[in-house]
Amino acid sequence: MSKIYNIAVIPGDGTGPEVITEGVKVLNATSSKFGFRLNLDFFDFGGERYLKTGEVLPDGAVDELRRYDAIYLGAIGHPDVKPGILERGILLRLRFELDQYINLRPVKLYPGVDCPLKDKRPEHIDFVVIRENTEGLYAGAGGVLRKGTPDEVAIQESINTRKGVERCIRYAFEYCKKRNKMNRLTLCGKTNVLTFAFDLWERTFYEVAKEYPEIKTDYAHVDAITMWFIKNPEWFDVIVTDNMFGDIITDLGAMIQGGMGIAAGGNINPEGVSMFEPIGGSAPKYKGQNVINPLAAICAGGMMLEHLGEEKAGKALEQAVMEVTGKHLKGLAAGQMGMSTTEVGDLVADLAAKL
């Protein structure tokens, strides 16, 4: 009997439903090829539901999502909803309440993809950023005094616990060991200024490192990381960092791998329910035009398959994407691919079923 995985699908806003449609198409083709099944249940969480009902997530939604093997997300963000409502009410709430404490972001330049860095090719850009995903500045600690007056005070505190820092760092060491590429793990921080938080990160990093003698370790300030991403991205293998710095450097990583149209990520709870998504936003200006690039959503689906233990299927899906970028697409930007959204999905699905 073939294995069955129960997947919660949240297409979301803007072009989210379009890219998820193509992602599901590729996932179904891949699962048929590799002999497992995906049972997909769709949820309408997002801007349209919020505008109709006033609900961001209904009561019981998080508990219902806990029952799934994984969550497949399109995009969150609606032009008629004030920024922050959907992001905090859906994305951050799911990350926090489902304890998805790892944000996993591969940064990989695929064949045929234009890189903005001079003389850099696929062999130079292939690293992974592991970002702590439930603490730091995003925990929401702080407040405002005397709002709207000349004496207004706004405080946003970065929360870093030994438990949260250590489990993120341990995940990074284990991931680096499994990846087995350069066997190098870099801690990204700001120890010269953020002396309290990154003292905890640095001490924990080197304490855990003693348990992994086969992994080379180093440290770089976040500002230096941004410079070396541009000058020498080939230096990096796996990078571990806190929530805010991870948020910033992964967007830079997306640009050097060719843009948001190819960047995918996972919000990981190694012991629970994880969520996979394209990194780009909902791109409402392209909604309904069949021109948006679905490859980031497709790659997120591949990450989901690997996380579920279907590593051969996930790798085959990635190989299909690389075949498409290397031989078939004119570009990655919306309207510049040389084919439509659905045509790209069809092509990747066809290739994935053959590999």
Image (tube, helix red, strand yellow):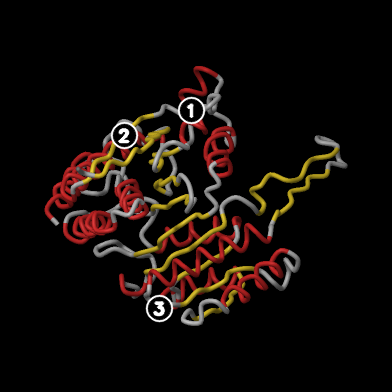
> Dot 2: what SS?
strand
Query: Which numbered disc, 2 or 1, marks the residue that appears first in the sequence?
Result: 2
Relative side of 19 to 88, left or right: left
Q: Identify the residue under disc 3.
A: 182
Residue at 39% in and 42% down: 69
Label 3, label 2: how far apart the Cα atoms are: 37 Å
Q: Identify the residue under disc 2.
A: 40
Relative side of 19 to 35, left or right: right
Residue at 45% in and 62% down: 253
Label 2, label 1: how far apart the Cα atoms are: 21 Å
Residue at 53% in and 42% down: 98
Relative side of 318 to 101, left or right: left
How many other residues sit within 10 Å of disc 1, few (<14), some (14-19) or many (≥20)?
many
Query: Which numbered disc, 1 or 3, marks the residue that appears first in the sequence?
Result: 1
> Dot 3: what SS?
loop
State which mark lies toward you, 1 or 3: 3
Dots 2, 1 in contact, CB < 8 A: no
Q: Identify the residue under disc 1.
A: 47
The amino acid pointed to by label 3 is Met
